[in-house]
Image (cartoon, grey):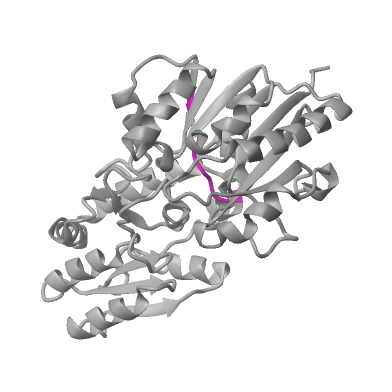
Amino acid sequence: MQKMKNIVVITPFYVCPHRPDLIQDSKAIYYLCEYTNEQERVIIVYYYQHTRMNAIKHFFRLLFGSNKEADYHYKDNHGNDVFLFEHACIIPKRYKTFSMFDRKYAKILNEFFSREGIKVDSVVVHFPSRFWGLTQKIKANTKTLILHSFDVEQKKRLTEVSTYAIKSNRIGYRSYNIKKSFKENYPFNVPVEFMCLSGIPGAIIENNKSYRKWRADGTLRLVFTGRLNENKNVITVLKALDSVQSKINFHFTIIGDGEERHSLEQYVYQAQLDEKVTFCGALERSRVFEVLREQDIFIMVSKKETLGISYLEAMASGNIIIGAKGRGIDGIVVNNENGFLVDPENPEEVADVITELCFCDIENIERIKQSSLNTVSELSEEKVSRAYLENIVR
């Protein structure tokens, strides 16, 4: 019988149903920890950071709050142990947790491990530039860093992470571009390196076998899904479409809402794109997939993106992808093989790719679509979860 593997995962993103007041940006780590086997016990340290706007309000409550394990410990829907630890950064531009919080929470964790007879095989830290302080205080056979965009986008953080890497056994990268950024600056060898990608439900991949025929009604149909904010950069797509509206017949569907919606609608009106652009607002997920299956191209040219699950969902729905060079999808999408990559700051380049696709021969379109489907079929939640868990305990 195989020995039980005890894995501690430190992350600022997870799920906590009994705390709806916590703003959760991502459930990605929740899904990565979904497919454990009988020989794996996962303990999640959900290290939630309060934004600076209300950090002072929470600071003393958290620092002098309960030391009882029961006040922090719960089980998730997968049966994993979860500890919700909150911290508040009140110093501008500080991103690391305070050592006083790290000591308090490490004491609670280590008492739990001692009582349960748990010897930690692997401690895994997402965003190590933030959470290395707590990581050091957990005794484990191996330490794994999972690098996110945040860890490599500034030289100071990148340098710090490199020093942590020397003290660790393995590194996972949340995108190919993150790996490239790290390795270009610090090319030393780490015993184990792996990609830590997100996936989508297998049912989406299996159920989306019938797609719209390419330009079925003579119209090139494009779609975007996501938050309408400055980072998602929908304005660049609209500028590109404005420049080609006299050359090609297209329709652009925008699914989502956000602070940029009004200004985007104004641009559409001023550019006389009213009949060619539809704002749907936020839709139920099932309806999003219905709309995706009615499109030809999914386009999202974000300024920053770790990966972007929306890309994968669109690939599984039979859309050809236009994404941003040097962002999270770069490496999963290979230009002109299973999709297209463009400079997100260059509307002319975006316009050129859209025009090229509009007049592309059907054989090439089918080649790209099939390659896209082959790619996403390897990125089901179950496959990426098992790869993640096996890489951190092997």
The answer to which of 308 and 167 lies nearer the viewer is 167
Which is nearer the eye, 208 or 37?
37
Q: In this rendering, does residue 394 appear at all?
A: no
Q: In this image, 110 relative to 62: left or right?
A: right
Horizontal side of 159 relative to 200 (left or right) equals left
Q: Residue at x 43, y 57 (%)?
A: 314
Relative placement, left or right, of 387 versus 113 is left
Q: Residue at x 86, y 24 (%)?
A: 117
Please determine whether, in this image, residue 88 is positioned above or below residue 382.
below
What range of the chain is rendered magenta?
193-202
Along the line of sight, the residue nearer the viewer: 300 or 81 = 81
The prevailing secondary structure element of the residues shown in magenta is: loop
Q: How many marks?
A: 0
Q: Position of residue 287 (x, y in %)?
A: 53, 72
Q: Residue at horizontal 13%, vertical 60%? A: 348
In the image, taking residue 384 as reference, residue 275 lies left or right, namely left
Q: Quadrant of the C terminus?
A: top right
Is residue 250 visible in the rendered image? The answer is yes
Residue 98 percent across, percent down from the top left:
57, 40
**Image vertical order of residue 274 relative to residue 173, above or below:** below
Against 236, is 380 above or below? above
Q: Which of these two is toward me, 28 or 141?
A: 141
Magenta segment includes 53:
no
Name, please, the residue furthest toward the right.
115
Residue at the image position 77 percent from the left and 26 percent from the top = 39
Residue 144 is situated, as x and y percent measured from the top left of the image, at 56, 25
Image-quadrant location for residue 139? top right
Image quarter hosting the N terminus: top right
Q: Where is residue 91 shown, x and y percent of the image?
A: 48, 49
